[in-house]
């Protein structure tokens, strides 16, 4: 052992400290010079290692580290013959070790955990980094121990040469645990009768110091030798990797010395073995936080000031600043002067540490799982829009705006399946529709209805994006990719597409390929969807409410045409505040409610309401849904009625919506049962064969309206 007495530095093996040496004050000068560098090394080693293993969770990192250290210590102990000399631990040894563990968790870790909850990260960093000095000072003041360097191996009672000390220190920094390991009873000193409490070897300057103990508590005059072999703790160092032992020893060291007498041999379970984990290991600090509550990072992180760690796969980086400085915003000053209202000052706010465990007690209590989502930018990089697709989107959006402005007398027809559930079938339908779009392009502006999201009144299949495999797997990342791929394929045919924007994030993945958008009856009243529409680059139709009320749609148009600021997600997946200019290309869609609203009288009433709201008197009529009473074949009759109004010269009807598929009808999604090809899995549709005459009838109506004006 390395004694504070300089005379003991020159002792030879098997020599004992003299009574005079024990009575002299400790010459700590040789030890104090190591206090500061030792503290810096101890505080920075674990954070430095975390820079190398930045993605390793604390418990996994410590387990690997302790396992490696344990293997090295085992090999070293076997090579030194320690097992043969000291034997295996006894039952009383294990009992003492259990008591050490109890004290460690109840006292040391409890205090550490409480400190981390109550103190800011900056203050905690300073205190934890200084803990080696604090421990040494408390040992001197409380237990009367002289300060010592504590860099020697247990089992030797003289200081090794400087070169060997440096080698042990290097091994400790590497986590091999060279210093401080002790198994046998080699470290023997005399407990002089004239010196109550003993004066032999010194304590370490730190928890990771040499394994020495003072024979305190011995009866005066007791003769014999004190075996300072860390009989219990040394074994635990081998089993757990040393850092734990360092922490255990410290708790006992600060709480109360424990001892048991075995004949003339006294074994101190609180003999210091902290250096078994190495000077750089920050052993007890790492275990102190890493083993309690799986906190975000170990105390070793904070000790080094790095302030980062991992908790359940989440990486936290950067030490929190003590305060957030108040912001000096010129715009805010300008607003104060302009409106004459004093704006509240932004006060500096303390950086209160966030406890993830406390947060989980009251937040996300009904979240079963959180999975990663692909970013819009990455999806667009995987599936970029070629120039031909971008040009088609621009041309079709411009054409739609011209119809809505009254500069184009064609009729907009949004036609297609109620929902997309199969890529090939959707593309087959697009090819058939493309032929009709080209044949009727002088009278109809045909946009293919490509709906990937379905609002449900209660529950049910929510669409191609949400559950592309229709099996409850909710492979949303695949759904987004498959949806974008289909849009690109349809655009490649030269056919513009329209879709409903139901989810507030999905537009970032596909909106660059959409020529026309819809806000459904269930979401027209939603402020979030109105704000979304105000920032979309395409024309948007708002359906009347599910009760048939048109006022909510008119209000939605007014709101969407105005600028807004709202929270959203950028293409890079970063949350941000979006400021919109407002969308002037919005219109009403009459889809019926408690009763149909496609008749001439209904159109007149809707236009009167729009006029009162200061909006353009124009409507699009959905011939499906409530207007057809959910009977898909009635779409043909409703479309004929609308065509009659158009032919009669009503220019306020600017468009029609039709639900059409390859085959008519609908089918249920039944697990294990194949689906019929070309049949809708949501609302019933008319077939493509039934759709063609409807389109021709609408085109003829446009020609009649045009002729009537001439």
Image (spheres, rainbow, N blue to C red):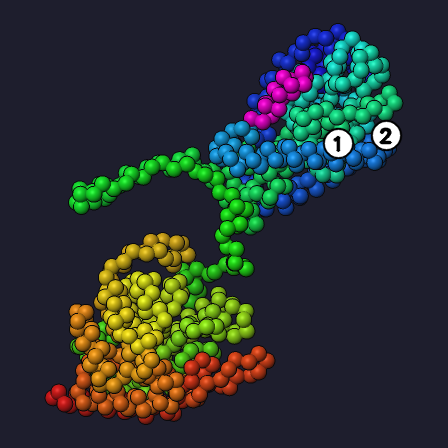
Q: Is residue 144 magenta?
A: yes
Residue 141, image quadrant: top right
- In this view of the protein, can residue 613 be seen by the observer? yes
Q: Is residue 596 left or right of residue 706?
A: right
Residue 211 position, x and y percent, is 72, 25
Which stretch is magenta? Answer: 130-145
Q: Looking at this view, is 81 or 191 the one in front?
A: 191
Please tell me whether mark 1 or mark 2 is closer to you in this view. Answer: 1
Mark 2: secondary structure? helix
**Vertical side of 248 occupied by 688: above or below:** below
Crowding around mark 2 (Cα neighbors within 10 Å: few <14, some 14 to 19, many 20+) is few
Label 2 sits on residue: 85
Gap in angstroms between the C-alphas marked 1 and 2: 16 Å
Q: Is residue 315 left or right of residue 11?
A: left
Residue 295 position, x and y percent, is 57, 43
Q: Is residue 334 magenta?
A: no
Q: Which mark is residue 398?
A: none
Mark 1: secondary structure? helix
State which quarter of the image contains the N terminus. Answer: top right
Label 1 sits on residue: 233
């Amino acid at each position: 052992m390395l004694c504070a007495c300089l005379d003991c530095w020159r002792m030879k093996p098997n020599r004992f400290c003299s009574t005079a040496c024990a009575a002299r004050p400790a010459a700590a000068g040789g030890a104090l010079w190591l206090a500061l560098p030792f503290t810096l090394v101890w505080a920075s080693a674990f954070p430095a290692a975390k820079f190398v293993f930045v993605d390793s969770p604390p418990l996994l990192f410590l387990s690997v580290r302790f396992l490696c250290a344990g293997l090295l210590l085992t090999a070293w102990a076997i090579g030194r013959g320690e097992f043969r000399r000291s034997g295996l631990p006894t039952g009383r040894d294990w009992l003492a070790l259990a008591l050490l563990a109890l004290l460690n968790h109840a006292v040391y870790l409890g205090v550490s955990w409480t400190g981390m909850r109550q103190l800011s990260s900056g203050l905690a960093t300073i205190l934890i980094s200084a803990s080696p000095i604090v421990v040494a000072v408390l040992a001197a003041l409380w237990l009367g121990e002289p300060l010592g360097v504590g860099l020697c191996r247990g089992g030797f009672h003289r200081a090794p040469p400087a070169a060997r000390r440096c080698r042990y220190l290097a091994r400790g920094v590497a986590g091999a645990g060279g210093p401080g390991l002790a198994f046998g009873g080699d470290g023997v000193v005399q407990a002089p009768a004239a010196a109550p409490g003993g004066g032999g070897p010194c304590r370490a300057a730190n928890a990771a110091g040499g394994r020495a103990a003072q024979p305190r508590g011995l009866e005066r005059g007791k003769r014999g030798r004190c075996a300072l072999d860390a009989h219990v703790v040394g074994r635990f160092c081998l089993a757990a990797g040393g850092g734990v032992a360092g922490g255990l020893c410290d708790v006992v060291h600060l709480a109360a010395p424990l001892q048991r007498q075995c004949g003339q041999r006294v074994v101190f379970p609180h003999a210091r073995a902290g250096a078994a984990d190495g000077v750089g290991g920050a052993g007890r600090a790492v275990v102190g936080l890493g083993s309690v509550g799986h906190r975000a990072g170990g105390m070793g992180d904070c000790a080094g000031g790095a302030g980062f760690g991992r908790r359940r796969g989440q990486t936290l980086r950067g030490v929190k600043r003590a305060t957030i400085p108040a912001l000096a915003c010129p715009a805010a000053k300008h607003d104060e002067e302009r409106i004459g209202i004093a704006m509240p000052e932004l006060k500096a706010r303390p950086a209160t540490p966030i406890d993830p465990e406390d947060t989980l007690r009251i937040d996300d209590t009904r979240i079963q799982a959180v999975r990663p989502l692909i970013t819009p930018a990455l999806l667009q990089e995987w599936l970029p829009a070629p120039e031909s697709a971008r040009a088609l989107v621009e041309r079709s959006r411009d054409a739609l705006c011209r119809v809505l402005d009254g500069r184009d007398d064609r009729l907009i027809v949004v036609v297609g399946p109620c929902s997309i559930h199969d890529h090939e079938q959707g593309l087959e339908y697009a090819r058939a529709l493309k032929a009709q779009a080209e044949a009727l392009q002088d009278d109809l502006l045909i946009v293919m209805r490509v709906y990937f999201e379905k609002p449900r009144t209660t529950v049910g299949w929510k669409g191609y994006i949400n559950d592309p495999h229709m099996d409850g797997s909710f492979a949303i990342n695949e759904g987004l990719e498959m949806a974008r791929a289909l849009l690109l394929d349809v655009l490649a045919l030269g056919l513009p597409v329209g879709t409903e924007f139901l989810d507030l994030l999905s537009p970032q993945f596909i909106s660059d390929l959409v020529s026309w958008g819809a806000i459904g009856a269930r979401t027209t009243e939603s402020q979030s969807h109105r704000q979304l529409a105000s920032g979309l680059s395409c024309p948007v139709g708002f359906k009347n409410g599910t009760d048939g009320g048109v006022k909510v749609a008119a209000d939605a148009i007014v709101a969407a045409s105005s600028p807004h600021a709202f929270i959203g997600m950028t293409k890079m997946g970063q949350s941000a505040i979006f400021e919109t200019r407002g969308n002037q290309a919005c219109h009403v869609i009459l889809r019926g409610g408690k009763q149909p609203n496609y008749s001439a009288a209904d159109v007149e009433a809707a236009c009167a309401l729009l006029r009162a709201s200061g909006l353009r008197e124009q409507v699009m009529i959905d011939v499906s849904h409530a207007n057809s009473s959910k009977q898909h074949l009635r779409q043909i009759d409703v479309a004929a009625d609308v065509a009659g109004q158009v032919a009669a010269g009503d220019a306020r009807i600017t468009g029609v919506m039709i639900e059409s598929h390859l085959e008519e009808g609908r089918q249920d999604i039944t697990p294990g049962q194949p689906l019929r090809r070309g049949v809708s899995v949501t609302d019933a549709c008319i077939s493509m064969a039934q759709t063609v005459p409807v389109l021709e009838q609408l085109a003829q109506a446009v020609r009649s309206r045009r002729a009537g004006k001439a």
